Amino acid sequence: MGGPLGAIIGRHPAAAGGGGEDELGGGGGGGDGGGIIRHNRRCRDLAFLVLFAAFWVAMIVNSSFGFNQGNPLRLTYELDYKGNICGSRHGDPDLHELDVRYWMNPNQVYQSGVKDNKINLADAKAICLMECPIPAADGLNFVCDYPEGDIRLSIDDWINRDYDYFEFLTPDMRNSSLQLQGPCYPVIFPSVNVYWSCQFIARASNVSLKHWQQMGGINIDENILIDKTIHKAINSKSSVLKRYVADIGKSWPVLIVCGGLLPLFLSVIWLLLIRYFVAAMPWITVVLFNALVISVTMFFYIKAGWLGNDPLTVVIGESDPYVHITGREISHLHAATVVMTVVMIIAFLSSIAIIRRILIATPVLKVAAKVIGEVQALIIFPVVPYFILAIFYMFWFSATLHLFSSGQVLRNDCNTDCCSYDLKLGKVNCDNCCGYSIHYTPHIGIAILFHLFGCYWATQFFIACSSTVIAGSVASYYWARGEISHDIPFVTVVSSLKRLLRYSLGSVAIGSLVVSAVEWVRFILECLRRKLKLVDSARESCFGKMTSSSSQCCLGCIDWTLKSVNRNAYIMIAITGKGFFKASVLATGLIMNNILHIGKVNVIGDVILFLGKLCVSLFCALFAFLMLDTHKYKSAHNKISSPLVPVVVSWALGFIVAKLFFQVVEMSIDTIILSFCQDSEEHQGNAQYAPPLLVETLDEQSELHRLTQGP
């Protein structure tokens, strides 16, 4: 084990003659060892600290690219035939009030859906309107191109005339319009606003079609493809992904409340309750967890349309009562509902299974409550990494919106024959047949993946820093031999933070990197597995399925083991000042020598703490559902495509915040038990530094184990 830990820490008699630096400061440096943690520390794992600094530089450069090239409006609104973003003030013309894309020529829409046709929907002539037009009840109305050239109308006048200036056209312009070449096009089909695009309904207006034919207009196809072609484009994978990212931007007040403020409040309340009502908290946690799982599952059922009369609708504004439009968002909600149902069943059965063992967790939590009561600053300290992470996430989410929208708006390379009236040229022009699309280069995909990985590594790093500071504070409390002075409640936390910043940032960086790398290997392998499954789903053998499941299980076990080893390594880093790998060896050896002792004491306590984190995060998800269920997020420009992503993000942020605060209890238990094991090894099984409550608790654990498991 590399020598007695007591000597390293400074209260062991062997440290009496050591001239180590008193890390606590003011703790007395006399011949009896005086200080709580004394050791000749030095900076460790500097190479990884340099790597982490380089990573931050790369994150800033990567995000700067997104801020320079991206425009979050592209995630919600589409492009017109000129390449303008609907709803943008910087288009030609100014389109800040015109945010709905409308395809003017119904025949182009139809032809783009015909198999092997050269016309693509992206090349069909589309303009931006305030709302989707509907056919006239007793005649024929038109939607005309943006006014320019000989059409002396302002954009406001054009809007006030319902986009119709057919009466001002010259005979040549009228003849061109009757040939579906513009500048005016008839409104024959009703349409509804689906995610800011006008979805045609393949049901022509008999009155409008009759007037169109009487005027000598060419034949207009009424095939169902007019409906299906637009529906397919609106619900493509890329469109759905963009809408999901846009939902994050639209629901930022929900994320601030449910992902930031609410979990902060709930976590502090939970810590105070565990401090003063420790005996009741395991039972409260289990009951509350089940109630929240059931509540969130019921909300998924409601939004999926399987319960009640409040399902998700994809139509913005007033919908046509005769049309039912489904999309990928609803399919994803159905899948999430099934998953939550399975989770609810497992949670209920698991709660029943651990009822008999909750008594074992209570004494362990009492030890943590005692530590929190003595080192009072531990309740307040997680606020520091909380605010650091809050600032980081605000920057990260903003950069995410810009990175996902950082493609270039370029004219399509098409090979089609089409003609339309050009108001600037004053004649029919057959050269500008191609529309515009947003093109994403491969380096943008790499930038997004790096951005996502960077978020995970940074989160793990800040959580690891917080864990190390807490471990150092609790170790100071333990090795003080219970002699609690006025310095303990606050100075130990400050001293532990100083030691981290001065000596151990590199060690924490490598520990968080290892966990992040394993998680991303799992993510990449899972993506490859799903892709291969789609390609060869028909011929997937039982052996292949078994191999895939086994590999995922093994990676999951490795990930769990690494996280456990890392957590104990941070404790040894805080106590000994060793590098990450040396601290991991020390922690692993100590655990293996006391595996039965640690296991029976720690497992149920960890389960209760995990359920507590889930309670906080599920409450955040439930409150996010309630906020997103208001009128603000169901209509107009704030309408979200699906509550799924904001709810999941709120849940994840709530879990991270809960983890920051709950690890005060978690790290307190782990640190004091590891210190107890080391103390026992140094003193032939009789711990010299253990507080009386810890000794009583471990004796009580042995008795409880005999009572619950039998002899």
Image: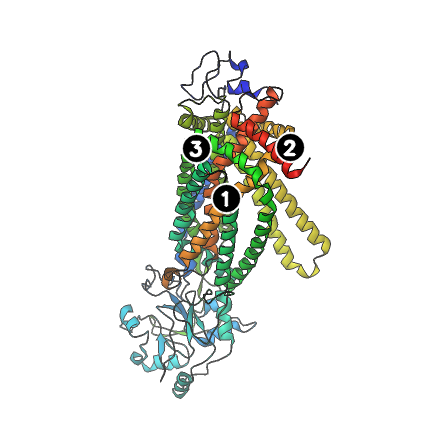
The residue indicated by pointer 3 is 378
Q: How far apart are the alpha carbons under marks 1 and 2?
A: 25 Å
Q: In this view, does 256 lie to the left or right of 582?
A: left
Q: Quadrant of residue 565?
A: top right
Q: Position of residue 522 (x, y in %)?
A: 59, 46
Task: Specify the amino acid type for callout 1.
Answer: Gly
Q: Are marks 3 and 1 in contact (CB under 8 Å)?
A: no
Q: In which quadrant is the N terminus drawn?
A: top right
Query: What residue is disc 1 on?
Result: 612
Secondary structure beneath disc 3? helix
- Residue 596 is marked as 2
Given contact means CB atoms under 8 Å apart, are the residues at marks 1 and 2 in contact? no
- Residue 710, by quadrant, is top right
* Distance CA(mark 3)–CA(mark 1): 18 Å
For the point 54% across and 74% down, the residue is: 114
Label 3: how many Cα within 10 Å (few below 14, some 14–19, many 20+):
many
Q: Which comes before the other along the chain, label 1 or label 2?
A: 2
Q: In this view, does 123 lie above or below 260?
A: below
Which residue is painted at 56% across and 21% down in the image? 5
Identified at 47% across, 43% down, the residue is 656
Dot 2 crowding, Cα within 10 Å, few <14, some 14–19, many 20+:
few
Residue 120 seen from this side: no
Say what amino acid the circle numbered 3 marks: Leu
State the image coordinates of residue 554 (x, y, percent, origin top left): 65, 44
Residue 336 versus residue 579 in the image, above or below: below
> Measured from the top left, where is residue 36 in percent x and y?
47, 21
What type is the residue that disc 2 sits on? Answer: Leu
Instruction: Work out which quarter of the rendered image holds the C terminus and state it.
Output: top right
Q: What element carries label 2?
A: helix
Q: In front: 614, or 366?
A: 366
Give the alpha-carbon distance from disc 2 to disc 3, as whole Å: 29 Å
